[in-house]
Amino acid sequence: MYRQRSRHSLWQAARAARSGALARAVAAAALALPVAGCMSFDEGVAQEVSLGAHVSDWREEIIYQVLIDRFADGDAGNNTRVSSALGRWHGGDWKGLEDRLPYLEQLGVTAIWISPIVKNVDTDAGFDGYHGYWTQDFTALNPHFGDLASLRRLVASAHGRGMKVILDVVANHVGQLFYYDINQNGQPDESVHGSGRPGQSPLERMSEYDPDFDPRGVQARTSLGESGPAPVIFRYDPATNHLPPLPELFQDPEVYNRKGRIFNFDDVDQLVHGDFPGGLKDIDTARCDVKRTMVDVFVRWVELTDIDGFRLDTLKHVEHEFWRYFTQNVRLRLKEKGKTNFFMFGEAFDGRDDLIGSFTRHEVPAHPNDEALGGDLDRENASEAEGGCPGDAPITGDMVDGVFYFSQYYQAFRDVFRDALGTRRIEDLWDAREAHYGTEPNANGTGLPPTKTLVNFIDNHDVPRFLYAGAGVSPFKADPEAALKNALLFLFTEDGIPCLYYGTEQGFSGGNDPANREPLWISGYDTQHPLFRWVQRLTALRRGYRALTVGEQRVRWSTDRTGGADEDAGIFAFERGDAGGDYALVVLNTHPKKHSSPSFGGEAMTTELEPGTVLIDVLSPGKKTYTVGADGAVTIKLPPVSGALLVPEEQVIQGL
């Protein structure tokens, strides 16, 4: 069995001399060793892989989000702590996902976003770290999911089927690995003080694991008063993997902001410097040593596996300047190894479109939050002594290639497709894209502007599933499955990159976490489920009609009207492509009760198509035809909660 300190001494040596071939070999051993069982250094070195670019245009990809623990169990040998409770480990692993790649291939998936791979706190406060967001060791693999060999087999098998693999990355925090010794008695305490009665002391809860935010830093105190910053004590419990974090840099208390738990997400100081609720300890990502270490660690995982992209967790909880440094240096390092067109998209769980878009903008500061935190390229490029962090090249305004389009989740999928509100909000949102996201591609990135690589989604692991109908959401106004099918039609025909959350194709309907993290095997991987078949058809159409992947997008009709007497109530129509070239016109009726058409007050929807052009609805059973009238007018009337995909007759692909 290897010795832990020796492994990380090797890792640090590799970081210091990463430009040499020997250093690369040593680092491979260092990062290959943790996992399920013992490996020799020689075995780690022997497992070098060559890197390649497996993507030509990310707009052509269809992403499928997988929580590894919940997708498929292919290796019973790593099933520890397994339970049927949704907050516990279930046994899914990389071998299980590899075995089920044919299921995803049949569905039409071309890229798989997998949950974090690194070693986590195993269990804490009655819940398990099955999701992967409680990092303990950035340089070790999670033994619940397999070893390096099984991860590599998964990636290689996916590539063999033309599928790409995207890795979920967490740089904002580690798991609950230390407590604040507020009363300085050397043990973690939780207590409640006061009576809360009128005229008496207020009721206060104090948890040394998860104390409230204090802008000064969490303070030590007793009944006699405060006594300065509270000491940080790292836990040591091998049974639950509450161990000092690795690499060793993260065992230094100064590497953390140590201000306590966020309770006001509108306060920038709390948002960026506070511990994530649940005791997840916030890393000081403004530090140069942290920036460099994060680049080293995550680049190394690419070098060891040949994955194709990163999904970056908790964007808005980290300084913009960190993302500028991280993304630019990751791209440069991977380019040297032959890995280009590496896609990095981020998650800011927020409905504010300008905030989400600020992480793709090139202006510095990119947002008032960036300005408040000192975003300044002159400083960021200065020496460390002057508050900067020089990278492999001068830092520019480049950041992520795209984002998880949360504002669209709220304004389109929730408000329109689920709750049947007016469709004008979609057009208004799309109209703000260039201003909020910018129009320039990142250097050494995907070659595409961020407005073209927004990652569109209906639901995910952090929000209730679309079909959820329980407490906390408004009642469905239409048949839930019909509404979901309409939303899926929108997802797979709009501009950007579609992302499907596992289980949507099986009609899963769980509420908030952990109810929305059901094990997929309860579905039997049913390829005849109506929603599976619908998604399968939509993915085939998207891949078949080039206008739906790379065509320009223009709204042709939207409306605020939702009344039963309004002829265009619930209508949204947009086109992809260009008249005379690859072209598609998508018309959706989101109204739950009435037939509607894109016309109002004698005005009909117009396009730039030539009069007499025959359009075919490739979704309708009989391939219904529509002839373009004068001024490019298209007349169509749709039943409640339905859609049409109109393609010029001469472009129709038989069999799709």
Image: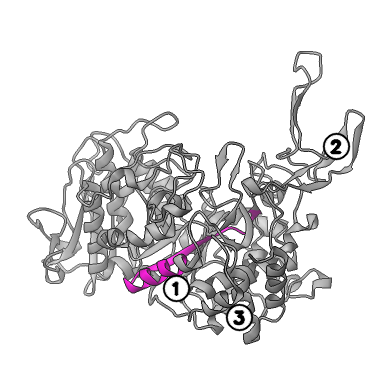
Q: Crowding near pointer 2: few (<14 within 10 Å), some, many (20+)?
A: few
Please identify the quarter of the rendering in which residue 63 is found.
Answer: bottom left
Stretch in magenta: 151-173
Q: CA distance from mark 3 to mark 2?
A: 45 Å
Residue 191, position as x, y percentages in the image: 75, 28
Mark 3 and mark 1 lie on one chain; the one further toward the N terminus is 3
Q: CA distance from mark 1 to mark 2?
A: 56 Å
* Circles 1, 2 touching at the beta carbon (< 8 Å): no
Could you say whether the residue bearing mark 1 is in a helix, strand or loop?
A: loop
Residue at horizontal 73%, vertical 71%?
9
Q: Crowding near pointer 3: few (<14 within 10 Å), some, many (20+)?
A: some
Tell me, yes or no, whether the highlighted magenta stretch contains residue 340: no
> From where the camera sits, is residue 380 visible?
yes
Q: Which residue is mark 1?
A: 448
Between residue 597 and residue 317, name the one nearer to us. 317
* Circles 3, 2 touching at the beta carbon (< 8 Å): no
* Circles 3, 1 touching at the beta carbon (< 8 Å): no
Q: Which residue is mark 2?
A: 185
Q: Quadrant of the N terminus?
A: bottom right
Q: The disc labelled 3 sits on which kind of residue?
A: Ala
Q: The disc labelled 1 sits on which kind of residue?
A: Leu
Q: Is residue 163 above or below residue 355?
A: below
> Is residue 289 shown left or right of residue 231?
left
